[in-house]
Amino acid sequence: MASVLVVEDDQFVRSALIRHLSDASHTVRSVGTALEALREVAHFRFDVVILDLGLPDLDGSEALKMLRGITDVPVIIATARDDETEIVRLLNDGADDYLTKPFSVEHLSARMAAVLRRSRGSGSGTGEAAPRQVLQVGGLTVDPLRRQAELDGARLDLTRREFDLLAFLAGRPGVVVPRKELLAEVWQQSYGDDQTIDVHLSWLRRKLGETAANPRYLHTLRGVGVKLEPPL
Ligand code: CA
């Protein structure tokens, strides 16, 4: 249970978010402009802010900077912009995580849970940055916040999608993730052909220095899904 501020000017998206968050027993307040958001965080304590980037009054990155000027509340950016440079900049400017629209409720819940875990885990709340959650699977290290991955100490040069795929799987080591879930969570599509996943898997596999015939980390279970686990 968390106290959430939704900053979103699209009435439809906003109502849907409020409904889903309330259903999940969160306390929700919502506003449609950046200035209202600033007023809210100045008056109330929130556990997390979900900030739409396309607001009518201020550019999202301006809004984020102003929020950061008065509070260290965790901020999840919700953006229709699928622009890696922009997202990296926002993360550097103090956003805790981001979601690319359209996103599923499950995806939002997972990101919120992770952000809350980090902020609550950091304890004292003295304004220090929350510790980064770095994922470690065998010799593989994945840092979702810095969007960097290493294998046995060597930096992997991954595309955005390859990184998302690897990070998603590394967050669930040893778990078989169904293809449908990968499509929904990594590609944010409710449908698609298996080839999309296969192609990215094979690229990722090559970068990990393995093949489908001789897997080390990435295991495909035909007709079921994919799992990532440390080599035996
Ligand atoms: Ca908007």
Image (cartoon, rainbow, N blue to C red):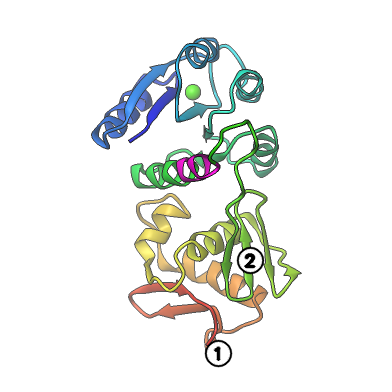
- Most common SS among magenta residues: helix
Q: Nearer the viewer, mark 1 or mark 2?
A: 2
Badge 1 vs badge 2, beta-carbon distance below 8 Å: no
Q: Is residue 188 left or right of residue 84?
A: left
Q: Is residue 121 magenta?
A: yes
* Mark 1 closeness class: few <14, some 14–19, many ≥20 residues within 10 Å: few
Residue 139 lies in the magenta stretch: no
Which of the labelled discs sits on residue 214, or is there none? 1
Q: CA distance from mark 1 to mark 2?
A: 21 Å
Range covered by the magenta-colored residues: 116-122
Eyeballing the image, is 85 above or below 55? below
Q: Quadrant of residue 16?
A: top left
* Mark 2 lies within 8 Å of ligand 1 (Cβ measured): no
**Residue at position x 53%, y 71% from top?**
201
Which kind of residue does numbered mark 2 sit on?
Thr
Q: Which residue has dot 2 on it? A: 141
Q: Position of residue 221 (x, y in %)?
A: 39, 80
The one of 132 and 156 positioned closer to us in this rendering: 132
Q: Position of residue 88 (x, y in %)?
A: 68, 42
Q: Earlier in the sequence, mark 1 or mark 2?
A: 2
Q: Residue type at mark 1: give it.
A: Asn
